[in-house]
Image (cartoon, helix red, strand yellow):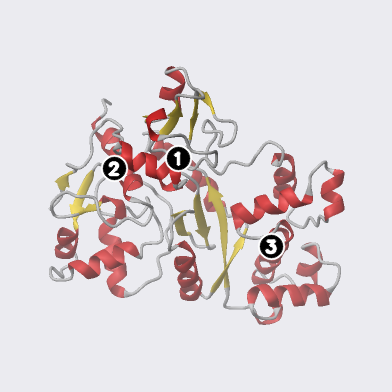
């Protein structure tokens, strides 16, 4: 039933010029890792999502990566910094991020940021853009996450409150209920989904994990991401909060190996709440070998429901764990690339990476 992927080559192919210029004008981050745009009139090259003023189409040439652009005499754009992974923490903010990661109970006000040489407004804007919340909200949710974990592991509510940086039980109870929707003492049966960003060559991804395993991995610019996260929280009776997980280091390492051609399979525990039909489809996806593809109709036959092609396509679209559950390996019956929430050119790039991994000399 499997077929060799006919839609990709070992080389990194580029979209046509009109597609790339449109992506550049629209600042489309879904083309991250697909091409860089070099501006002849300025001698710089940019990532597709660069916010700089756009040149005329005749003044742009395109390369598959930054290395090639540099080899052709172009220099890095100082605005979008294409030599740095999209979503990376800027140098001016890195010390603060390290401080926060080392102490989940930390409480910082505007004056504390100024003492560290940081503009509170600038910090707030960065967190709002990257995490969808203010810096103060980010710190508060990390504290709630820690307190929730302690309570679930039998720590008394009072101890959990003070160990998480709260100065009063009333303030803790109010903040906990506002975030979790219930009082601390009544939170048994709930879960927290720890969420964090992972940088990849194709753009940042949002990872989510419960204590049992990975339950979310999606590109942050996917249009249905917020809806998928809402559905996941309802399915698991959980609240998604910024935080760490022992699974994230493993996930980041395995993704790094995947993108550098050192890994074709993943061995992380996956949490995939869904209907019985969705579970069948997602399980079938995980049987498609790296470097190969199947059609939607082949997938329908494999799960024993050959007439359910459209339903299979919908279930593929509802997959919340990209790459690890490889819905990108399903293509049209005619070999065309269709239906990928992260963007079709990103899907094409993933297939090219996998094909190269399989056919390269050992």
x, y (%) of residue 325?
34, 55
Q: Mark 1 Cα within 10 Å, few/some/many (few <14, many 20+)?
A: many
* Residue 60 visible in the picture: no
Q: Which residue is label 1 attached to?
A: 48
Asked where in the image residue 172 lies, by quadrant, the reply is bottom right
Task: Name the secondary structure under disc 2.
Answer: helix
Q: Which mark is residue 351?
A: 2
Say which residue appears at 29% left-offset and 38% top-offset. Answer: 16
Q: Nearer the viewer, mark 2 or mark 3?
A: 2
User: Relative to 94, is 253 on the left or the right?
Assistant: left
Q: Nearer the viewer, mark 1 or mark 3?
A: 1
x, y (%) of residue 169?
82, 75
Asked where in the image residue 285 lies, by quadrant, the reply is bottom left
Sequence-wise first label, 2 or 3? 3
Say which residue appears at 43% left-offset and 18% top-offset. Answer: 71
Q: Which residue is label 3 attached to?
A: 146
Sequence-wise first label, 1 or 3? 1
x, y (%) of residue 233?
51, 71
Say which residue appears at 44% left-offset and 66% top-offset. Answer: 228
Q: Is residue 213 above or below residue 9?
A: below
- Disc 2 versus disc 3: distance between alpha carbons? 39 Å
- Disc 2 versus disc 1: distance between alpha carbons? 20 Å
Q: Which mark is residue 67?
A: none
Task: Name the secondary structure under disc 1.
Answer: loop
Q: Mark 2 Cα within 10 Å, few/some/many (few <14, many 20+)?
A: many
Of 96 and 283, nearer the camera is 96
Q: Is residue 25 above or below residue 275?
A: above
Task: Name the secondary structure under disc 3.
Answer: helix
Sequence-wise first label, 2 or 1? 1
């Amino acid at each position: 039933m499997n077929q060799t992927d006919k839609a990709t080559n070992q080389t990194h192919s580029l979209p046509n010029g009109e597609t790339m210029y449109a992506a550049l004008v629209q600042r489309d981050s879904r083309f991250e890792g697909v091409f860089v745009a070099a501006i002849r009139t300025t001698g710089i090259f940019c990532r597709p999502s660069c916010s700089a003023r756009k040149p005329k189409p005749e003044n742009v040439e395109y390369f598959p990566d930054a290395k090639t652009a540099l080899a052709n005499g172009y220099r890095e754009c100082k605005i979008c910094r294409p030599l740095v992974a999209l979503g990376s923490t800027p140098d001016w903010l890195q010390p603060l991020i390290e401080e926060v990661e080392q102490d989940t109970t930390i409480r910082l006000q505007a004056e504390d940021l100024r003492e560290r040489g940081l503009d509170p407004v600038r910090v707030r804007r960065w967190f709002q853009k990257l995490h969808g919340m203010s810096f103060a909200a980010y710190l508060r949710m990390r504290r709630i996450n820690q307190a929730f974990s302690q309570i679930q592991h039998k720590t008394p509510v009072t101890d959990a409150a003070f160990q998480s940086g709260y100065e009063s039980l009333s303030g803790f109870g109010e903040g906990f209920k506002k975030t979790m929707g219930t009082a601390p003492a009544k939170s048994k049966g709930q879960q927290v989904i720890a969420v964090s960003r992972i940088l990849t060559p194709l753009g940042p991804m949002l990872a989510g994990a419960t204590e049992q395993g990975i339950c979310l991995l999606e590109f942050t610019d996917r249009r249905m991401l917020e809806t998928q996260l809402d559905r996941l929280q309802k399915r698991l009776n959980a609240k998604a909060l910024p935080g760490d997980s022992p699974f994230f280091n493993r996930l980041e390492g395995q993704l790094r190996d995947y993108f550098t051609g050192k890994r074709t399979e993943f061995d992380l525990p996956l949490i995939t709440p869904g209907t019985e039909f969705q579970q069948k489809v997602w399980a079938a996806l995980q049987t498609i070998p790296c470097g190969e593809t199947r059609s939607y109709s082949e997938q329908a036959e494999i799960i024993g429901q050959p007439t359910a092609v459209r339903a299979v396509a919908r279930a593929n679209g509802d997959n919340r764990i990209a790459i690890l559950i490889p819905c990108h390996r399903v293509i049209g019956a005619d070999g065309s690339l269709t239906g990928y929430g992260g963007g079709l050119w990103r899907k094409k790039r993933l297939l090219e990476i996998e094909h190269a991994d399989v056919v390269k000399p050992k």
